[in-house]
Image: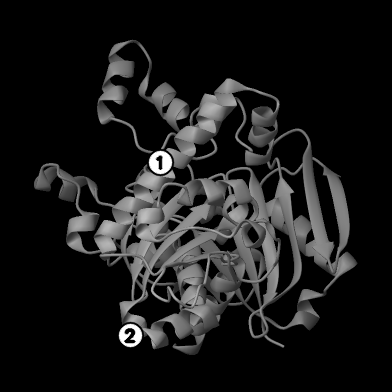
Amino acid sequence: MSTVLVLNSGSSSLKYQLVDPAPGDALAAGIVERIGEASGRASHEVRGARTVREGAVADHGAALRLVLELFEETGPSLGEAGVVAVGHRVVHGGTSFSAPVVVDDDVVAAVRDLIPLAPLHNPANVTGIEVARELLDVPHVAVFDTAFFADLPAPAATYAIDRGTAAEHGIRRYGFHGTSHEYVSRAVAEHPAVTAKLAAEGRGPETLRQVVLHLGNGASASAVLGGRAVETSMGLTPLEGLVMGTRSGDVDAGIVFHLIRSGLSPDEVDTLLNKRSGLLGLGGVNDMRELTRLIESGDDDARLALDVYLHRLRKYVGAYAAVLGGIDVLAFTAGVGENAAHVRAGVVEGLGFLGLGVVPDLNAARARESRVISPTEPEAPARPLVMVVPTNEELAIARQSLAVLAAR
């Protein structure tokens, strides 16, 4: 057995998963939360059995040591599991990284240099890598959220601002959630319903036109043509694009200047748009399940929040249909995309002119596998497929880590 320990280091958390990449199995998973606070919490799950530890966790070093203790005490033993690599999720790779890389001191320094582009994420990513390299004597691989979008076509990647200023400050569309978008778009391309559709139309996989909606607390859309991303909703930072749990998504940049001139500091505006906007700012909660309960109770603010959320999604789907010259597959993924049937139905509502629609019973059904939820009438073989495709970023990181090591 060759396994990969996948680490996702946040500012006050450490998520992890031990993955056997060949069959795609997660042998163990968990999270350490509230790192650096007075009271921390660790949760470690193996084969459905969960172990919880409460207590202060001083820093990321202490968090990883606690994780290693939990593996040894409750299993599976990392020594016996054949860990051959540690795969690290890194949010921002800038223009320096367009593919996963084996970590060395130069890579760590480069990721640190990118902190100004991702001040909320890259500092924790660097800390997680440094701590893990000290405690785990195996190769470490950095897998970047931005890598899938590194070769966006220039018209999609370029902001219409002064070229010199953009070059000096590294301003371009980078895109995020790339590991998920790449995993899902590949799973779509390999799905029997999709390969059958292309075959019936006499087309090859290089013509497959997908729109992927990664809908979680963070949310992003991508347009993928023949396996290559040609457009995505997040930009220089993960703030741009769709309405999210606490992020505003697209706003007029003039709002920022107006608020600063009205007395808010730049940091206060940053906090407003990243942490106090989106569903939370409009509806009072950032969890779609809670928002739905508020709507069912007659809450008008919650109803408007969902309407704004769906309006933005429909607008992006329509725009990406124009970018691609049509849609073959609309794929929903991540927590909301995979579980909220009413959101999926709400997105396709009004998009019948694109051939998009869902079958209520198929849409309402729950399954762990990728599935088609749209009509598949024989008389309309060219109609786009609407699919639910569970994402698995940890598996993607594990497999990419092994591929990088094998190519050395």
The answer to whether any part of residue 247 appears in the image is no
Circle 1 packing at 10 Å, graded few (<14), some (14-19), many (20+), is: some
Whether residue 405 is situated above or below residue 168 in the rendered picture: below
Residue 406 rendering spot, x and y as whole percentages: 50, 89
Taking 283 as reference, is 354 left or right?
A: left
Amino acid type at circle 1 is Arg
Which residue occupies 36% across, 84% down?
201
Q: Which mark is residue 170?
A: none
For label 2, the residue is: 203
Relative image position of residue 126 (x, y in whole percent): 50, 55
> In the rendered image, which quarter contains the C terminus?
bottom left
- 198 or 215: nearer the viewer: 198
Q: Is residue 19 left or right of residue 334?
A: right
Name which quarter of the figure residue 40 lies in. top right
- In the displayed orientation, state which residue is furthest to the top: 262
Q: Is residue 334 above or below residue 210?
A: above
The residue depicted at 60 percent of the width and 46 percent of the height is 342
